[in-house]
């Protein structure tokens, strides 16, 4: 019997991808990207090296699932956040909750440090940021009473993602408090698009 997308087989594959990603993320964070081997990732994930290569062509691909999930979870969290009247404040709250108080906050911060110091992983981060921006557009469109095709909404989504990336990078590389860095970067982004929308109304 052929398994169809979304059935048990596909869910098992998704879980395995996440296991691989979690194993790679922990190893990269603990001992560095260069020092981590495919064999170590496979062993930690409880799979064979052959199975690893069925899911990932190179070891950089191992954390793709983690980065992709992170890009989507931001938009989902913003959508679920009860509006306070300030878009910037709501985005800040969601971001800080995830990276400072979330269940896997420490691992995420350590992985982020590895990503920002490893060019080949940084390429995956850029792709994830584009996905995060695209996922955030419909959330912002509903919040601001605009269409998803509105260029202003896309610009705001891009500004928010860029601001959060700058804050995260600054924090993990300098040791600066993440919450303070995020607030500063988001306020700068807000001033940048204040001519499009009244910040007080967001």
Image: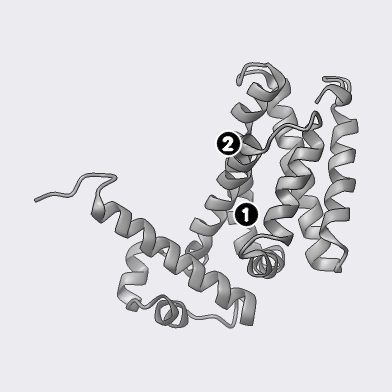
Which residue sits furthest left?
A: 1
| Distance between the alpha carbons at the discs numbered 2 and 1 | 15 Å
Residue of label 1:
125
Q: Is residue 113 above or below residue 144?
A: below
Horizontal relation, residue 4 to residue 153: left or right: left
Q: In the rendering, at what x and y percent does residue 112 appear? A: 68, 64
| Sequence-first disc among 2 and 1 | 1
Helix, strand or loop at label 1? It is: helix
Local packing at callout 1 (Cα closer than 10 Å; few below 14, some 14-19, many 20+) is many
Helix, strand or loop at label 2? It is: helix
Q: Quadrant of residue 120?
A: bottom right
For this rendering, which residue is in front, 5 or 105? 105
**Residue found at x 89% / y 39%:** 187
Local packing at callout 2 (Cα closer than 10 Å; few below 14, some 14-19, many 20+) is some
Q: In the rendering, at what x and y percent does residue 151 appear? A: 69, 21
**Residue found at x 53% / y 58%:** 66
Q: Is residue 53 above or below residue 65?
A: below
Where residue 97 is drawn, which disc sits there? Answer: none
């Amino acid at each position: 019997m052929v398994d169809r997308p979304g059935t048990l087989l596909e869910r098992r594959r998704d879980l395995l991808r996440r296991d691989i990603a979690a194993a790679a993320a922990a190893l990269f964070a603990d001992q560095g990207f260069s020092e981590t081997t495919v064999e170590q990732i496979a062993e930690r994930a409880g799979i064979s090296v052959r199975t690893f290569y069925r899911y990932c062509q190179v070891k950089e691909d191992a954390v793709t699932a983690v980065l992709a999930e992170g890009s989507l979870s931001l938009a989902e969290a913003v959508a679920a956040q009860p509006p306070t009247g300030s878009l910037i404040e709501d985005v800040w709250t969601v971001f800080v909750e995830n990276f400072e108080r979330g269940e896997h906050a420490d691992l995420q911060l350590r992985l982020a440090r590895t990503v920002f110091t490893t060019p080949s992983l940084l390429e995956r981060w850029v792709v994830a940021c584009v996905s995060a921006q695209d996922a955030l557009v419909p959330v912002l469109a509903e919040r601001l009473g605009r269409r998803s095709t509105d260029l202003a909404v896309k610009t705001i989504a891009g500004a928010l993602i860029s601001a959060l990336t700058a804050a995260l990078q600054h924090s993990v590389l300098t040791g600066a408090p993440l919450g303070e860095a995020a607030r500063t970067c988001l306020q700068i982004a807000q001033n940048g698009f204040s001519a499009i929308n009244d910040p007080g109304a967001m």
